[in-house]
Image: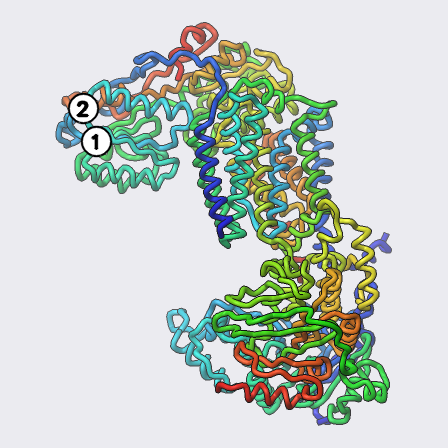
Amino acid sequence: MTSFRTLAVLSLAAVLAAAGCAKGESTASGPEPAAGDGRQVASTPSAAGPACTLEKFGGQPFDLTKDMVGFSQSEKEANPFRIAETKSIKDEARKLGVGNLRVTNAQSQFSKQISDVQQLIAQGAKLLVIAPLNSDGWEPVLAQAKQKKIPIVTIDRKINAEPCTDFLTFIGSDFYEQGRRAADQMIAALGGKGEVAILLGAPGNNVTTDRTKGFKDRVAEKAPGIRITFEQTGEFTREKGQQVTEQLIQSRPGTNGIYAENDEMALGAVTALKGAGKSPGDVKMVSIDGTRAAVQAIVDGWLHAVVESNPRFGPLAFETARKFAGGQEIPANVVISDREYTKENAQSSLGQAY
Amino acid sequence: MAAAPPLLEARGIRKAFPGVLALDDVSFRLGPGEVHALVGENGAGKSTLIKVLTGVYQPDRGELRLGRKQVAFATPLQAQRAGISTIYQEVNLVPQRSVAHNLLLGREPRTRLGVIDLAGLYDAATRTLSQYGIRVDVRRPLRSLGMGAQQMVALARAVSTEARVVIMDEPTSALEPREVDTLFGVIDRLRGQGMAVVYVSHRMEELYRICDRVTVLRDGRLAHTGPLAELDRLKLIAVMLGRDVAEVRERGTTTFSGDHEVRGGPLVEAKGLSRRNLLNDVSVTVRPGEVVGLGGLLGAGRSETAKAIAGAFPVDAGTVLVAGRQAGRATPAARIRAGVSLLPEDRKAEGIVPALSVRDNIALAALPRLSSAGVVSEAKIDRIVDTFVRRLRIKVTSPHQKVSELSGGNQQKVLLARWLATGPKVLLLDEPTRGIDVGAKAEVQALIEELAAEGLGVLLISSDLEELVEGADRVVVLRDGAVVGELAGGQVTESAIITAIAAGGGDD
Amino acid sequence: MTELTAVPVIDKARLLSWLQQYGVYLAVLVLLLFNVLFTPHFLEPANFRTQLIQVAPIVITSLGMALVIGTEGVDLSVGSVMALSSAVVVLYLGYGAGPAIVVALLAGALVGTGGGALVAYVGVQPIVATLALLVGIRGVANVLVPQLREFRNPTLIWLGSTSVAGLPLVVAIAAALTAVVAFVVRRTVFGRQLVAVGSNRAASELSGLPVKRILVSVYAVSGTLAAVAGILATSRLQASDPTSLGLLMELSAITAVVVGGTPLSGGQVRVLGTVMGALLMQLLSATLIKHNLPQSWTQMVQAVIILAAVYAARGRHP
């Protein structure tokens, strides 16, 4: 028993030491993005769907500076997208002087997200911003919010419910459109013909489905000379992207282009290409997200283009809320315009990538 | 009796395994209302025959008849459905569930809603058990019962499933004398109902108490079959061993020859071993060349005393000296280094390592001595294994044979070899001959003699009073964890031991 | 032709037993043959290099798992330990690659020792003790390195990308560790003792074996090997990604061990079988990827193989 206690103490000491003495590599990191750079712009502020007003929704006006605002994040802030998303909400709230912002994180557990939001409601939030983990299963939360007339703004993923009745509005990218634009970049890079492989995202995810369909639809209508010969999931991770690409380039050396449905898989693919002795540009690559590392890879010549999926929802979310509280009309979907990074703008835009 | 058609009959059974002919033209008849002893040394073919009768094995040749019908069992379940139930040494039930659930597992009475009718279940279970003279609270989990009571439940379950033939393999090995009586009562009742019982046991007195007929197997062949009353004990042993009656008579049924020459001061001295509620100030001394018996009933503290000396049973107080010196920390490793070795009572649970070969089992405890810098020396192991396989006459096809494939007697010899390989000064033997066949038993007893003659000290625990009396120079009698008597020389008789146990104060 | 119908009857139990021990070799052979016939570019050296490189971390982790399973235990923490070692190695790169690797290995050994102590001294069931570590250590790794972190240290990148005489260093390391573990299992006192502990702990204790020390050591070795795998995976990815690195590795490792013919009931360690088990799973996944079939099929086929392995194992103890 004593030896066990000794072990436990030693383990604890070691963990503390590990954190305490850590000394990372000194790498020159890029400049921090300047505030306001790369902020989202709504591409369809009033066009899509029937509009919603405070009167129609049936709520009371709220004051962002005094009332409590809840933000429920779905996944751990472990990838650039989630980090930038949460940071953007917090930064904008600080800028606008939101007095009482509560942030929760569901750690990728849907049941936790439901109870997170229920707690925010119980604590008296007057506005809820939710980055949903799932599209379905929100009925209990929506019913509670509706009873208290709390407007909900969902960001980045949709939920299956009635806008303006069950919730206020959705702000996010059009993933299908992202896929189409990635296809346009790929078609341009290959001159309209060649063999293309797709690194799919995590299976059973609507982001994966939309980005795949958009890409394929566009290729089918614009470039019949391009054949999609390979589709395998890289599960949105760099390691799987690398492993699948290693298999791909070995068994299908004729592959001309790789479309990665997020940047992490694209960067994994780059590592695989480097490992196989390829040079930048040997295989044309297009991906989606717009992280700093991916934009840097464009500068280095490994990626042809990156379609952005902008995570900085803060300004647009609060602006939408303010308009709503002020009695203005709000569309059912606020679709944001995502930009593209290519060789032409990559170097100069590096500071704006997240 | 002979006129009645047999209930179960096997004719000309032959079963071969690679390299072994386990059964060679064996026939076996079992009449209704008959308790039939099936005996033989280990390796004689008893368990193979049972497995053929119960559908575990399919015979290569020969036929099985149930009543007048010829049958073939592809699985044990088919045999069970045909009315042949088997009670194994280990109880095959669900220990966490209640006695009643176990008893009626799969046949629970149901309410109209299809839910188990608990009241009905407990009622039926109580009734079934009381038929066999067993009175327990059927709502208690099975594991809270003693081994004996668990076995009775297994038996009751077997016979209440419309069995016509019940096969009992060493049913009494875990039972207290009182439980044995109950079991025999049940067997009598089964006999009265016209059921047939195949009774396998190494305990001679039990065979003569309960069995009507006997079949003796030797080396896979039928050696004898007939009424047990026609064969006295000596003759039976002679048939089993294939030896002369006169030879057996002369040497007795144990191979112990009498007193040993005791030389020098104490080899091991255990003083004042105590542990709350289990051991109370037990002191035992063994000198070189001496066999000291530990007598007493089950639960008297015999095994605990041996384990405490071996460092495998923590004590609150007491010291152990080996050759006059403190025997190191109370761990098996330290005591083995000091020269104390324990052959544990439960061969299967605490002795053999089933996944390992005979060779690795023998070498296990002595590995540190058979290696250098942590790397084992195969040559040293081969040498020591070879020595002991030969000296103990362990029957193996090769030292690399899995130990689990050996008979009980040979497994016991492997364990003895494991302990002898550590070069012990003192051997603590806890029931060294229990559950092994007559031949192996004689060999183990002879070995104990031999080791004592070589100057080892032996502490012998045995429930077999005859073995204790003939084998031990001195007997220390325990009761309720305390020493209640010590007998030496001419005092060591069965009746003296029984008197000591009975007179040992306290009441029960 | 009709004479050929007199096929000898094969004892089913013996067949199953044979399959449990050597089925994995047969399956690898069949899969190789299929690929040689139907997969373009399969016989190129680059292909074998790819498969061996990718399987190396799984092999290394499975070796440790095989030892733990040999003691009738299981180590669910291996995937999280990989993530931890990955986080630690980049955190300490400032001191140079050598010291960083040493610290990461120590971290793995320490976690293993902790798990082993819980099992041996506190008596927690292995599955519970290491499940706690699976959750907890992944958390620690995420705290240490909250998001994917790239590194430029040339030594660490070299480790994951260089070849020695045509053999990738990563593969050479896996092969060397396999040889060491095989030696330990077959020829050392420790190897014999751990198997005995797995087969019958009470008998081992009574035979004077240092059971608790053996258990702690086995888990420590498993933790260390998982750390090696984590470091190699990190060096290959040229980034540390504790959120996803080693996810579900415990299942891959257990699968490799079981498919390789080591029974979960302990008392046996089949080192080469385990390596073959890992190779089988790797080849299976590669085959489906190369033929552009959905990877969910891999999981289904894996399930079938596991069931077959478990069924064959059952046949050994009638």
- Identify whether A150 is placed above or below A39: below
Q: Which residue is more in the foreground, C77 or B466?
A: B466
The residue under the point 58% across, 61% down is B330
Chain to which mark 1 belongs: A
Quarter of the figure that contains the N terminus of chain B: bottom right
Chain to which mark 2 belongs: A
The answer to whether residue B21 is left or right of residue A138 is right
Q: Percent from the top left, x then y, of residue A149?
A: 17, 35
The amino acid sitting under disc 1 is Pro
The answer to whether residue B394 is left or right of residue C172 is right
The amino acid sitting under disc 2 is Phe
Q: Which residue is more in the foreground, B142 or C310?
A: B142
For label 1, the SS is loop
Q: Percent from the top left, x then y, of residue C150?
A: 50, 21
The answer to whether residue C183 is left or right of residue B143 is right
- Residue where numbered disc 2 is placed: A324
Among the two numbered marks 1 and 2 on one chain, the one whose residue lies closer to the N terminus: 1
Q: Which residue is more in the foreground, B466 or B125?
A: B466
